[in-house]
Amino acid sequence: MLKDLVLKNRSVRRFQEKKKIGRKTLEELIDFARITPSASNLQPLKYLIFESEGNDKIFPYTNWAGYLKDWDGPEEGERPAAYIVVVGDREISTNYWADPGIAMQTILLRAVEKGFNGCILGAIDKKGIRTKIELDERYDILYVVALGYPAEEVVLEKCEDDDIKYWRDNNDLHHVPKRKLEDIILN
């Protein structure tokens, strides 16, 4: 059921790095994103796949978990098994509207359905990535989707006192506060 997939789809930041995801599986995730709605049906998004040794081209340019001030991101062995870099093709459009969000959520829901998870990274060094992978200027780097088999548990919490900051407890359980339904419906 869709609700089960949405509940399992958490932003995972620590992975079983050695447990690989094959290129065909990554292509399947992108194929699901390919058929999602697109503003004016322009379909300006393109994707770059990185896995195994290619991951070193992406990881150094990522920032992880801004609320966890004493954590610099996943250590070796806990890093993603793969990355999908989402780019916009400026020759098609310079406004990507909601397309990246729709595509990335679809990628993550399919990943969860297949037994692994991911994290959308917007805090990335786009210039560093562009230089490292020698990406043509025609493409805007929009986001990076980190993917892998989880090495952490993420639980949802009720938001207390409007505090939405996620946190980890002493057992490394990752807690994510969510606002109540009555707090987000305005009428």
Image: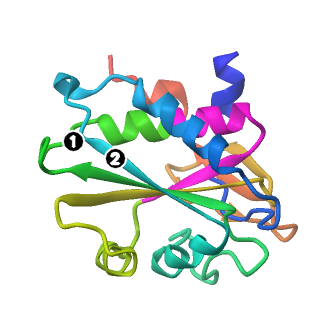
Q: Secondary structure at mark 2?
A: strand
| Residue 173 visible in the current orientation | yes
Mark drawn on residue 107: none
Tell whether 79 sits left or right of 146: right
Position of residue 83 relative to residue 179, above or below, is below
Tell whether 121 sits left or right of 140: right
Among numbered discs 1 and 2, the one appearing first in the sequence: 2
Residue in front for this viewpoint, 123 or 57: 57
Position of residue 139 relative to residue 125, above or below, is above
Mark 2: which amino acid?
Lys
Q: Which residue is mark 2?
A: 46
The picture quadrant where one finds residue 15 is bottom right
Residue shown at 63%/84% (left/top)? 70
Q: Which residues are magenta?
A: 106-121
Q: Quadrant of the N terminus?
A: top right
- Cα–Cα span, label 1 and label 2: 11 Å
The picture quadrant where one finds residue 135 is bottom left
Q: Specify whether residue 28 is painted magenta.
A: no
Tell me residue 25's x, y (percent).
66, 41
Q: Which residue is mark 1?
A: 96
Tell whether 62 sits left or right of 166: left
Q: Secondary structure at mark 1?
A: loop
Tell me residue 169's x, y (percent).
79, 66
Residue in front for this viewpoint, 182 or 2: 2
Scheme by which the image is coloured? rainbow
Residue shown at 40%/24% (left/top)? 36
Q: Specify whether residue 112 is painted magenta.
A: yes
Tell me residue 58's x, y (percent).
50, 73
Mark 1 vs mark 2: in front: 2
Q: Residues within 10 Å of mark 2 (few under 14, many from 20)?
A: some
Q: Quadrant of the C terminus?
A: top left
